[in-house]
Amino acid sequence: MTAPARSPRPVPEASGPNRGQGLLRVRFLGVAVFLVLLWVVFAVSADNFLTAGNARAILFAAAVLTIAAAGEAMVVLTGNLDLSVGSVMGLSAYVTADISTHVDGGPLLVLVAVAIGAVLGLLNGALVALLQIPSIVATLGTLSVYRGLTYVYADGQQITSNEVPSWFGALAGGSVAGIPNLVLLALLVVIGAAAALRWTVPGRMLYAVGSNSDAARFFGLPSVRVVWSSYIVAGAIAGFAGFLYAAQVGTVTVVLASGWELQVLAAAVIGGVSIWGGSGSIVGVALGAVVLATIQNGLILLGVQAYWQLLIQGAAIVLAVAVDAAITRRAALLSRTRRRVAVTA
């Protein structure tokens, strides 16, 4: 006699079935309205902002950031952070570019960059998921370790655009039907990641673990494996983004993508991914990247100094986190109120 087949346990919802969707709609609408306001302000105040060429430049600048931020969002959805993104991008890009100067690997070198990023993400995931080191501490450490490895590997050398194959430049500078290749690749990553989060079980597990890891474990979800996998995927995507960024800038140095961890995290949070985990969308992340690219583009057209741009970007991060915290508190208060009403009814 065979035992009856056991049906899989449902992925748990943290605080009611509508909470996540409600937060998602509020954040997505908020960032969309903010982006429209930015375009209106810069269109009025900066010459040549509202042109087709400048719009193309903004999307081109946001493309690689969108890809890297999509990977970061996978980690943030689980309630963790990855501050080593810039270093993963830099090491993946430098090693791949260096290999291209010795081996004619063609576009397959993209897979090398992805594999390097995945390995670095695997190490991050082991520190956070297996050893239970707080993610901000673990990835702050690997940020320095991975950048240090890049310095050791490079040995003070840089790789110029004349040394890498010509298809590097063609990949970044080319276009299809007037749309830059980098923008098309960013769209493919956004569509793929959004579909994976929306319609696959592993994608839904990220939300469940990020919403309430204790409840997720109670329902039998492999929380450790889910968090670990999110870091591997984020690392692979960061490796891909690093490769594209190297192709975009041409010359690869040891400081490539330094400081990108803040931009990537900012794009994710501004785009509506909750810094506490469990809520957010990849489409919102793409909007967040466009917001940052718009701010930078508009400030450059207005002649604002670089240090003011950095200050404004930091203020945008703080504002986004504050708004996220306020929305989360408001949603939790409404959820508790509804439960009390349901109990007393």
Image: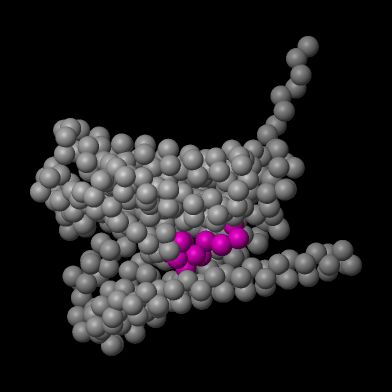
Please say if 82 is above or below 37: above
267 inside magenta stretch:
yes
Tell whether 236 sits left or right of 203.
left
Q: Residue 280, percent across and down?
A: 53, 59
The residue at the point 62 percent across, 74 percent down is 326
For the C terminus, the image quarter is bottom right
Foreground of the two, 242 or 73: 242
Foreground of the two, 86 or 172: 86
The residue at the point 37 percent across, 62 percent down is 259
The residue at the point 61 percent across, 39 percent down is 130
For the N terminus, the image quarter is top right
Q: Identify the image quadrant of residue 38.
A: bottom left
Tell whether 195 sits left or right of 158.
right
Residue reaching furthest bottom? Answer: 45
Please say if 4 is above or below 259: above
Tell whether 339 sits left or right of 112.
right
Residue 119 visible to an observer of this rendering: yes
Q: Residue 301, percent across and down?
A: 23, 80
Residue reaching furthest top? Answer: 1
93 inside magenta stretch:
no
Scheme of colours in the image: one colour
Residue 200 visible to an observer of this rendering: no
Q: Identify the image quadrant of residue 233.
A: top left
Q: Residue 170, percent across and down?
A: 14, 49
Magenta part of the chain: 265-277
Q: Residue 123, percent across and down?
A: 49, 40
